[in-house]
């Protein structure tokens, strides 16, 4: 059951605005949606405290990257609201080669309208292994 006043569409809006602001480097907006003690765990178990740290990491891994969001799933656990953004990544690798269809799942935990935890998974490492001839398909 949803916490009082927390409709799934409102939760998706919070996370979507945060994601768009993160991709645009809009720190004022990301700060509005992110709890001050938020934990961000990225691919490979990398820990970050702020979205701009993720941006610096992504600047090395990609020339540019965007998300094609396919769906949202929202669930509730006590006072936490968990929102999943599921879709694919597209963009360019640092060498300029384009890519698309790189699956991702982002998991957000929201408490009192603020994102307290963000976990990110995607297939970029698998794709890079394949490009290097190291994948075991």
Image (tube, helix red, strand yellow):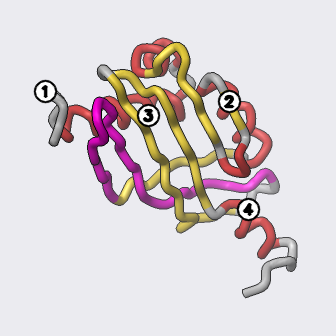
> In terms of sequence position, does the residue under pointer 3 or pointer 4 come before the other?
3
With 34 as the anchor, is 50 left or right in this view?
right
Q: CA distance from mark 1 to mark 4?
A: 40 Å
Residue at disc 2, secondary structure: strand
Image coordinates for residue 112, horizontal then vertical, percent: 30, 20
- Disc 3 to disc 1: CB gap under 8 Å: no
Callout in the foreground (1, 4): 1
Residue range in magenta is: 71-94
Q: Which mark is residue 4?
A: 1
Residue 136's quadrant in the figure? bottom right
Q: Nearer the viewer, mark 4 or mark 2?
A: 2
Q: CA distance from mark 4 to mark 2?
A: 19 Å
Residue 20: assigned label = 3
Q: Tell which of 101 and 126 is nearer to you.
A: 126
Of pointers 2 and 1, the one earlier in the residue sequence: 1
Dot 2 or dot 3, earlier in sequence: 3
Q: Check disc 3: other Cα within 10 Å, few if <14, some if 14-19, many if 20+.
A: some
- Badge 1 marks a residue whose secondary structure is loop
Q: Residues within 10 Å of mark 4 (few under 14, many from 20)?
A: some
Q: Any mark on residue 48, and which?
A: 2
- Judging by the rendered image, the residue that carries numbered circle 4 is 125
Q: Position of residue 40 (x, y in %)?
A: 59, 33
Task: Single out the mark in the foreground, 3 or 1.
Answer: 1
| Residue drawn at (31%, 37%) of the image | 81
Query: What number of labels is visible?
Result: 4
Q: Main secondary structure of the magenta part?
A: strand
Could you tell me how far apart the alpha carbons at marks 2 and 3 are, in whole angstroms?
18 Å
Q: In the rendered image of this protein, does residue 129 appear above or below residue 40? A: below
Q: Looking at this view, is 19 or 6 the one in front?
A: 6
């Amino acid at each position: 059951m949803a916490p009082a006043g927390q409709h799934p569409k409102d939760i998706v809006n919070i996370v979507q605005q945060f994601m768009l602001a993160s991709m645009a480097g809009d720190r004022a907006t990301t700060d509005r949606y992110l709890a001050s003690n938020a934990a961000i765990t990225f691919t490979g178990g990398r820990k970050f405290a702020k979205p701009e740290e993720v941006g610096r990491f992504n600047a090395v891994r990609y020339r540019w990257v965007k998300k094609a969001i396919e769906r949202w799933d929202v669930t509730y656990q006590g006072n936490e609201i968990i929102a999943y953004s599921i879709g694919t990544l597209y963009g360019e690798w640092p060498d300029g080669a384009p890519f698309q269809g790189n699956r991702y799942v982002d998991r957000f935990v929201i408490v009192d309208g603020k994102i307290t935890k963000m976990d990110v998974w995607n297939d970029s490492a698998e794709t890079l292994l394949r490009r290097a001839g190291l994948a075991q398909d």
